[in-house]
Image (cartoon, rainbow, N blue to C red):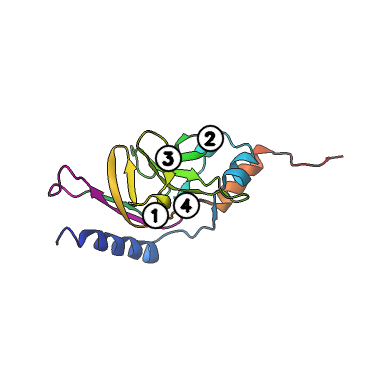
Amino acid sequence: MTAKKLPLVLLLLLSLLTTFGCVQHKTFSKFSHRYHRERYSLSDENLRSLSFYSSTDILGKGVDPQNPGGEERVFALSKETPGLLVEAGPDFLRVSFRKGGVGALFLADSTKEHYDFYYLATEVEGGGFQKLEDVKDGVLRLDGVEFKILAGSSAHLVVDWKELTDLFETLSVRLEGRTQ
Protein backbone atom coordinates (compact mmCIF):
# COMPACT_ATOMS: atom_id res chain seq x y z
CA MET A 1 0.00 0.00 0.00
CA THR A 2 1.42 3.37 -0.93
CA ALA A 3 1.88 6.12 1.61
CA LYS A 4 -0.55 8.34 -0.33
CA LYS A 5 -3.39 5.82 0.01
CA LEU A 6 -2.90 5.21 3.75
CA PRO A 7 -4.89 8.25 4.98
CA LEU A 8 -7.82 7.39 2.67
CA VAL A 9 -7.86 3.79 3.87
CA LEU A 10 -7.79 4.94 7.51
CA LEU A 11 -10.69 7.35 6.89
CA LEU A 12 -12.68 4.55 5.26
CA LEU A 13 -11.98 2.24 8.23
CA LEU A 14 -13.02 4.95 10.71
CA SER A 15 -16.27 5.49 8.81
CA LEU A 16 -17.05 1.77 8.73
CA LEU A 17 -16.31 1.33 12.43
CA THR A 18 -18.50 4.32 13.27
CA THR A 19 -21.34 3.12 11.04
CA PHE A 20 -21.36 -0.60 11.80
CA GLY A 21 -19.59 -0.86 15.16
CA CYS A 22 -21.25 -2.05 18.32
CA VAL A 23 -21.59 1.44 19.71
CA GLN A 24 -24.17 2.51 22.22
CA HIS A 25 -26.13 5.38 20.72
CA LYS A 26 -26.02 8.57 22.72
CA THR A 27 -27.56 11.98 22.31
CA PHE A 28 -24.79 14.53 21.96
CA SER A 29 -24.86 18.25 22.65
CA LYS A 30 -22.34 20.86 21.55
CA PHE A 31 -20.37 22.00 24.57
CA SER A 32 -20.61 25.77 25.03
CA HIS A 33 -18.24 27.99 26.98
CA ARG A 34 -20.85 30.51 28.17
CA TYR A 35 -23.99 28.40 28.28
CA HIS A 36 -22.49 25.33 29.96
CA ARG A 37 -19.12 26.19 31.50
CA GLU A 38 -19.78 29.73 32.78
CA ARG A 39 -23.52 29.59 33.44
CA TYR A 40 -23.14 26.55 35.69
CA SER A 41 -19.72 27.63 37.05
CA LEU A 42 -18.16 24.32 36.06
CA SER A 43 -14.83 23.80 37.79
CA ASP A 44 -11.91 21.86 36.33
CA GLU A 45 -12.94 19.00 38.61
CA ASN A 46 -16.48 19.07 37.18
CA LEU A 47 -15.11 19.10 33.63
CA ARG A 48 -12.82 16.14 34.41
CA SER A 49 -15.90 14.08 35.30
CA LEU A 50 -17.29 14.44 31.76
CA SER A 51 -16.45 12.42 28.67
CA PHE A 52 -15.86 14.64 25.65
CA TYR A 53 -16.20 13.63 22.01
CA SER A 54 -15.35 15.17 18.67
CA SER A 55 -18.34 16.19 16.56
CA THR A 56 -16.80 14.45 13.53
CA ASP A 57 -14.02 12.07 12.58
CA ILE A 58 -10.64 13.77 12.26
CA LEU A 59 -7.86 12.53 9.99
CA GLY A 60 -4.43 14.09 9.53
CA LYS A 61 -1.16 13.18 7.88
CA GLY A 62 2.16 13.95 9.57
CA VAL A 63 4.21 16.78 8.09
CA ASP A 64 7.97 16.67 8.62
CA PRO A 65 9.89 19.03 6.31
CA GLN A 66 13.18 17.83 7.86
CA ASN A 67 12.50 14.21 6.88
CA PRO A 68 10.21 14.07 3.80
CA GLY A 69 10.87 10.38 3.10
CA GLY A 70 10.75 9.27 6.72
CA GLU A 71 8.17 7.35 8.70
CA GLU A 72 4.66 8.60 8.06
CA ARG A 73 2.65 9.69 11.10
CA VAL A 74 -1.12 9.73 11.15
CA PHE A 75 -3.58 11.56 13.40
CA ALA A 76 -6.89 9.66 13.40
CA LEU A 77 -9.76 10.26 15.78
CA SER A 78 -13.19 8.65 15.54
CA LYS A 79 -16.11 10.76 16.72
CA GLU A 80 -17.16 7.80 18.91
CA THR A 81 -13.93 7.92 20.96
CA PRO A 82 -14.44 9.36 24.46
CA GLY A 83 -11.83 11.78 25.74
CA LEU A 84 -10.97 13.18 29.14
CA LEU A 85 -9.94 16.68 30.10
CA VAL A 86 -6.21 17.04 30.77
CA GLU A 87 -5.97 20.85 30.86
CA ALA A 88 -8.36 23.79 31.06
CA GLY A 89 -7.67 27.44 30.43
CA PRO A 90 -9.92 30.50 30.42
CA ASP A 91 -11.08 29.84 26.82
CA PHE A 92 -9.68 26.43 25.89
CA LEU A 93 -9.92 22.77 26.85
CA ARG A 94 -7.25 20.15 26.10
CA VAL A 95 -8.80 16.69 25.80
CA SER A 96 -6.89 13.41 25.58
CA PHE A 97 -8.52 10.69 23.49
CA ARG A 98 -5.94 8.01 24.30
CA LYS A 99 -4.17 6.95 27.45
CA GLY A 100 -1.00 8.98 27.90
CA GLY A 101 -1.87 11.28 25.01
CA VAL A 102 -1.02 14.98 25.25
CA GLY A 103 -4.52 15.91 24.20
CA ALA A 104 -6.11 17.73 21.33
CA LEU A 105 -6.79 21.41 21.88
CA PHE A 106 -10.27 22.94 21.56
CA LEU A 107 -10.72 26.72 21.68
CA ALA A 108 -13.95 28.56 22.54
CA ASP A 109 -15.05 30.81 19.70
CA SER A 110 -15.44 34.12 21.53
CA THR A 111 -16.60 35.87 18.34
CA LYS A 112 -20.02 34.25 18.74
CA GLU A 113 -22.35 36.22 20.99
CA HIS A 114 -24.44 33.39 22.40
CA TYR A 115 -23.05 30.06 21.32
CA ASP A 116 -19.31 29.95 21.74
CA PHE A 117 -18.52 26.29 21.16
CA TYR A 118 -15.09 24.69 21.53
CA TYR A 119 -13.52 24.16 18.09
CA LEU A 120 -10.44 22.12 17.18
CA ALA A 121 -7.46 24.45 17.54
CA THR A 122 -3.73 24.49 16.99
CA GLU A 123 -0.76 25.91 18.83
CA VAL A 124 0.66 28.95 17.01
CA GLU A 125 4.23 30.16 16.86
CA GLY A 126 5.03 32.61 19.63
CA GLY A 127 2.45 31.04 21.95
CA GLY A 128 -1.30 31.00 21.99
CA PHE A 129 -3.91 29.09 20.03
CA GLN A 130 -6.03 29.55 16.91
CA LYS A 131 -9.08 27.71 15.59
CA LEU A 132 -7.82 25.22 13.02
CA GLU A 133 -10.41 26.17 10.41
CA ASP A 134 -8.98 29.73 10.51
CA VAL A 135 -5.40 28.58 9.88
CA LYS A 136 -4.43 29.04 6.22
CA ASP A 137 -2.19 25.98 5.94
CA GLY A 138 -4.64 23.69 7.80
CA VAL A 139 -1.80 22.27 9.88
CA LEU A 140 -2.52 21.03 13.40
CA ARG A 141 0.49 21.55 15.66
CA LEU A 142 0.28 19.18 18.58
CA ASP A 143 3.11 18.88 21.09
CA GLY A 144 5.77 19.77 18.51
CA VAL A 145 4.38 17.49 15.76
CA GLU A 146 2.60 18.88 12.70
CA PHE A 147 -0.33 17.19 10.96
CA LYS A 148 -1.98 18.34 7.73
CA ILE A 149 -5.66 17.79 8.52
CA LEU A 150 -7.41 16.03 5.63
CA ALA A 151 -10.86 15.73 7.23
CA GLY A 152 -12.48 17.22 10.32
CA SER A 153 -10.79 20.63 10.58
CA SER A 154 -14.06 22.21 11.76
CA ALA A 155 -14.64 19.65 14.53
CA HIS A 156 -15.99 20.87 17.86
CA LEU A 157 -16.44 19.29 21.29
CA VAL A 158 -19.67 17.52 22.13
CA VAL A 159 -20.79 15.76 25.31
CA ASP A 160 -23.33 13.09 26.10
CA TRP A 161 -26.48 15.03 27.01
CA LYS A 162 -27.48 12.61 29.79
CA GLU A 163 -24.02 12.76 31.37
CA LEU A 164 -24.10 16.58 31.27
CA THR A 165 -27.58 16.87 32.79
CA ASP A 166 -26.62 14.37 35.51
CA LEU A 167 -23.68 16.62 36.38
CA PHE A 168 -25.96 19.68 36.53
CA GLU A 169 -28.29 17.86 38.91
CA THR A 170 -25.43 17.01 41.27
CA LEU A 171 -24.30 20.62 41.35
CA SER A 172 -27.67 21.80 42.76
CA VAL A 173 -27.30 25.08 40.91
CA ARG A 174 -29.87 27.69 41.89
CA LEU A 175 -30.95 29.64 38.85
CA GLU A 176 -32.27 33.20 38.93
CA GLY A 177 -35.49 33.73 40.86
CA ARG A 178 -36.84 33.28 44.32
CA THR A 179 -37.52 29.90 45.83
CA GLN A 180 -40.19 31.17 48.23
According to the image, label 1 marks what residue?
Answer: 153
Q: CA distance from mark 2 to mark 4?
A: 17 Å
Q: CB under 8 Å between callouts 4 and 1?
A: no
Instruction: Look at discs 4 and 1 and give the one toward the viewer.
Output: 1
Residue plotted at (58% across, 50% down): 112
Q: CB under 8 Å between callouts 3 and 2?
A: no
Which of disc 4 and disc 3 is earlier in sequence?
3
According to the image, label 4 marks what residue?
Answer: 156
According to the image, label 3 marks what residue?
Answer: 129
Which of disc 2 and disc 3 is earlier in sequence?
2
Q: Residues in magenta?
A: 55-72
Residue 162 sits inside the magenta stretch = no
According to the image, label 2 marks what residue?
Answer: 90
Q: CA distance from mark 3 to mark 4?
A: 15 Å
Q: CA distance from mark 4 to mark 1?
A: 9 Å
Instruction: Look at discs 3 and 2 and give the one toward the viewer.
Output: 3
Image position, residue 3 (x, y; %): 17, 58
Which of disc 3 and disc 1 is earlier in sequence?
3
